Image (cartoon, coloured by chain):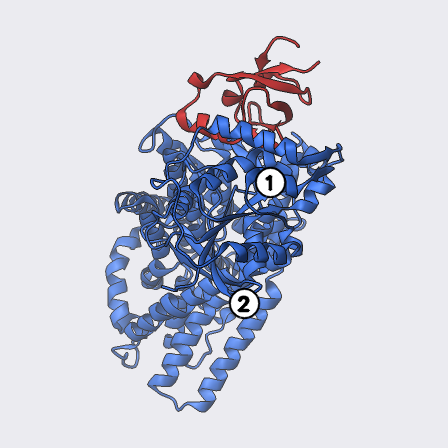
């Protein structure tokens, strides 16, 4: 188990689990939506795609779902890469 | 108010709820509205295996009972019995995506806690199996304590069993909520963990399979090929709107001419004949010819939506939209606005952020809606020379393209300005589930198209027909003496002369002033209005479309035509759009602002165009 890193710096297709979420950095609706989409400690996560045109959103596999997130939100999700 | 038992379909977005609703009710559906909100109420009838009929209502998709949009609020209020105009359902069908139990079971657990009789439809069972996921519905049924039925809505599988189990739940007695306030366990994290444990228990085996969705996304979301393909899809879409509509437009025109001839042949010359032939048929016909284009545009949008591509387009566009202070979510309503701003503005309900949503509503009318097409097509055909500026690129097509681009650029500039002034606020987020790709079911698309066609034809038959008929009356009386022009002597002519004073500085003539008023009812009525006016001025001619173009050529200068086109890029000329904006923003403040800023922009831009065109000697 490596040290947790931010989701937005996780390399594409590197499998990881959610280590923790910085709820304080998220707005109330953002935090709720994130929970509703199943983001929770221990859940498997993987970056699938990064949108074009610079700092666009990323598409992640969270559990069995594919979810699009902005980088700012991804920055408050800490993940532990699975070696 | 019917006394039939009421069953509500509930579930997460992308669980295949609407497909199941269509499969259960067939084409016997009613679309209405919940009172006070603009959320559509889709209901239909369903017969249980023992013959008892029940009313089925399809609730908007939601992630939980904690609503973050008006749609989700309706879902919560219906299942808790607090929605105005809806009784508490006698039972719920909870639809879950078999391949996404981890997430969808959480909402199911919340719903079960309410205490209503529930049957769970384990939908898209075949897709889960294709993905290598083997599930045991019996385990799920035991753990949840409610009936669970595996279904494949699009292939009509499992429906009989679903109906049978539903029949067992509806016993006829009154139902009561366990949690009377509707406030149930809303600790999402706890529920989520239980859902995940249940999902693991119900999974027999999971073998990694090659997933179509991942393979398609590798191409469609690729940083290089993704945007190129999106652009290509949009290009094909707009190309098709023009190319595929030519033949059906010809048929409709032929039918109108046939009707006019029949009226002329059967009725004696006079008031009634002129009213029917020049007023109603010429006016309404000039509008109905655009039905094919509108349907083609909607067909593309419905298919893109049904396949799951629309969310990918939003993903690809998010960065660009963020540049003007919007989110990728705004892309879908704005794209729909190319068909019509009314469904586009209604589609903004999926945007959670209030400021973001308001900005999208305010700029939606700038997207070139299909009602402008009749106006653009007519004016371009009449006054822009049909020459080629380069191989394969005609000047007329180029002008049409430029008008579309201008609308988009204007919308982006407006968004940028609005987000820095009246809708200032922190930038909103973009968080969306990306559904699996699905082959759209032809029947579902056809049903969607049918309801659009009905709305359009109703409008053509009521608002537009009434406007055109009124205009015909106003422009026919008082009758002109020899040597006078009917379009100037009539009541409408006098009203137009008043408007003309205001619009003369931006190059508009008397005909345009006359067309502007009916165009308030609906933009395309401008074409019908001109057809009617010219038909009255020259009663010997039949008001065909070719004739209309010829008439314009004789009466308009090129700078006038360009100013007129520019006016239509901006002017908020559509009562329906203003009405829907009032409903969606709950008041007159924002529609008034929208009308004000768009008219000001229209006047200024048309004026600049006219004077520039005159200055360069066009």
Q: Colour of chain A?
A: red
Residue depicted at x 42% and y 43%: B349
- Report the residue marked by disc 1: B142
Q: Colour of chain B?
A: blue
| Mark 1 closeness class: few <14, some 14–19, many ≥20 residues within 10 Å | few
| Mark 2 closeness class: few <14, some 14–19, many ≥20 residues within 10 Å | few
Q: Is residue A80 above or below residue B404?
A: above
The residue nearer to you, when weighing B583 against B175, is B175
Farthest-out residue, top: A3
Tell me which numbered mark, 2 or 1, is placed earlier along the sequence.
2
Q: Secondary structure at mark 2?
A: loop
Residue B16 percent coordinates (x, y)? 58, 47
User: Between marks 2 and 1, how big is the CA–CA gap?
Assistant: 28 Å
Q: Is residue B269 above or below residue A26?
A: below
Residue B585 percent coordinates (x, y)? 32, 44
Residue A70 percent coordinates (x, y)? 52, 26
Of tags 2 and 1, which is closer to the observer? 1
The residue nearer to you, when weighing B249 against B326, is B326
Q: Is residue B306 left or right of residue B491?
A: right
The residue nearer to you, when weighing B173 against B505, is B173
Q: Are marks 2 and 1 in contact (CB under 8 Å)?
A: no
Which of the 4 image quarters holds residue B166?
bottom right
Residue depicted at x 67% and y 51%: B392
Q: Disc 1: which chain?
A: B
Q: Is residue B456 left or right of residue A49?
A: left
The answer to whether any part of residue A52 appears in the image is no
Which of the 4 image quarters holds residue B41?
bottom left
Q: Disc 2: which chain?
A: B
Residue B51: which numbered mark, if any? 2
The residue nearer to you, when weighing B266 against B439, is B439
The answer to whether any part of residue A13 appears in the image is yes
């Amino acid at each position: 188990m490596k040290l947790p890193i931010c989701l937005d710096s996780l390399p594409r297709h590197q499998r990881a689990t959610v280590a923790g979420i910085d709820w304080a950095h998220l707005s109330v609706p953002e935090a709720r939506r994130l929970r509703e989409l199943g983001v929770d400690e221990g859940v498997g996560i993987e970056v699938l795609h990064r949108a074009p045109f610079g700092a666009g959103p990323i598409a992640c596999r969270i559990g069995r779902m594919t979810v699009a997130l902005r980088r700012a939100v991804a920055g408050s999700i800490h993940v532990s890469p699975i070696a | 108010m019917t006394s039939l038992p009421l069953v509500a379909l509930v579930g997460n977005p992308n669980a295949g709820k609407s497909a199941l609703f269509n499969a259960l009710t067939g084409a016997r559906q009613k679309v209405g509205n919940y009172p006070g909100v603009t959320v559509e109420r889709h209901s239909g009838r369903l017969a249980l295996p023992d013959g008892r009929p029940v009313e089925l209502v399809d609730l908007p998709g939601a992630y939980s009972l904690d609503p973050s949009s008006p749609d989700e609020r309706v879902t919560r209020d219906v299942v808790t019995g607090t929605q105005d105009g809806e009784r508490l359902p006698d039972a719920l069908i909870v639809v879950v995506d078999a391949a996404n139990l981890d997430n969808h079971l959480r909402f199911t657990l919340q719903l079960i806690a309410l205490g209503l009789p529930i049957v769970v439809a384990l939908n898209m069972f075949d897709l889960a199996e294709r993905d290598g996921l083997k599930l045991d519905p019996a385990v799920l049924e035991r753990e949840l304590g409610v009936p669970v039925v595996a279904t494949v809505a699009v292939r009509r599988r499992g429906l009989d069993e679903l109906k049978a189990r539903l029949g067992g739940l509806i016993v006829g007695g009154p139902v009561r909520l366990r949690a009377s306030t509707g406030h149930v366990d809303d600790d999402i994290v706890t529920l989520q963990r239980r859902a995940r444990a249940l999902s693991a228990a119900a999974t027999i085996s999971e073998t990694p399979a090659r997933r179509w969705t991942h393979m398609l996304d590798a191409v469609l979301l690729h940083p290089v090929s993704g945007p190129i393909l999106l652009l290509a899809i949009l290009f094909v879409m707009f190309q098709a709107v023009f190319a595929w509509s030519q033949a059906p437009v010809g048929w409709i025109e032929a039918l109108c001419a046939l009707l006019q001839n029949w009226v002329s042949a059967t009725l004696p010359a006079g008031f009634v004949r002129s009213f029917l032939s020049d007023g109603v048929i010429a006016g309404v016909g000039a509008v109905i010819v655009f039905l094919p284009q509108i349907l083609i545009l909607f067909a593309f949008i419905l298919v893109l939506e049904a396949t799951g591509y629309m969310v990918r387009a939003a993903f690809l566009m998010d960065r660009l939209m963020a540049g003007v202070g919007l989110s990728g979510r705004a892309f879908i309503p704005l794209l729909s606005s190319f068909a019509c701003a009314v469904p586009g503005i209604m589609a903004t309900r999926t945007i959670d952020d209030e400021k973001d949503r308001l900005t999208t509503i305010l700029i939606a009318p700038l997207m070139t809606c299909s009602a402008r097409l009749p106006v653009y097509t007519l004016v371009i055909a009449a006054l822009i020379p049909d020459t080629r500026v380069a191989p394969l690129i005609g000047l007329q097509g180029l002008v049409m393209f430029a008008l579309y681009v201008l609308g988009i650029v204007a919308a982006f500039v407006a968004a940028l300005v609005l987000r820095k002034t009246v809708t200032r606020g922190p930038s909103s987020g973009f968080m969306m589930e990306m559904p699996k790709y699905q082959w759209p079911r032809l029947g579902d698309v056809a049903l969607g198209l049918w309801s659009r066609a009905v709305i359009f034809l109703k409008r053509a038959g009521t608002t537009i027909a009434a406007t055109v008929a009124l205009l015909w009356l106003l422009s026919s009386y008082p009758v002109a003496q020899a040597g006078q022009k009917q379009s100037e002597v009539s009541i409408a002519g006098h009203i137009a002369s008043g408007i003309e004073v205001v619009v003369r500085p931006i190059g508009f003539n008397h005909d345009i002033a006359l067309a502007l008023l009916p165009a308030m009812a609906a933009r395309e009525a401008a074409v019908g209005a001109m057809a009617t006016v010219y038909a009255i001025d020259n009663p010997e001619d039949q008001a065909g479309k070719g004739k209309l173009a010829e008439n314009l050529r004789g009466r308009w200068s090129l700078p006038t035509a360009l100013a007129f086109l520019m006016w239509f890029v901006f002017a908020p000329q559509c009562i329906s759009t203003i009405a829907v904006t009032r409903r969606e923003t709950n008041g007159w403040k924002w529609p008034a602002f929208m009308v004000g800023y768009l008219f000001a922009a229209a006047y200024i831009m048309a004026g600049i165009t006219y004077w520039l065109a005159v200055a360069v000697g066009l």
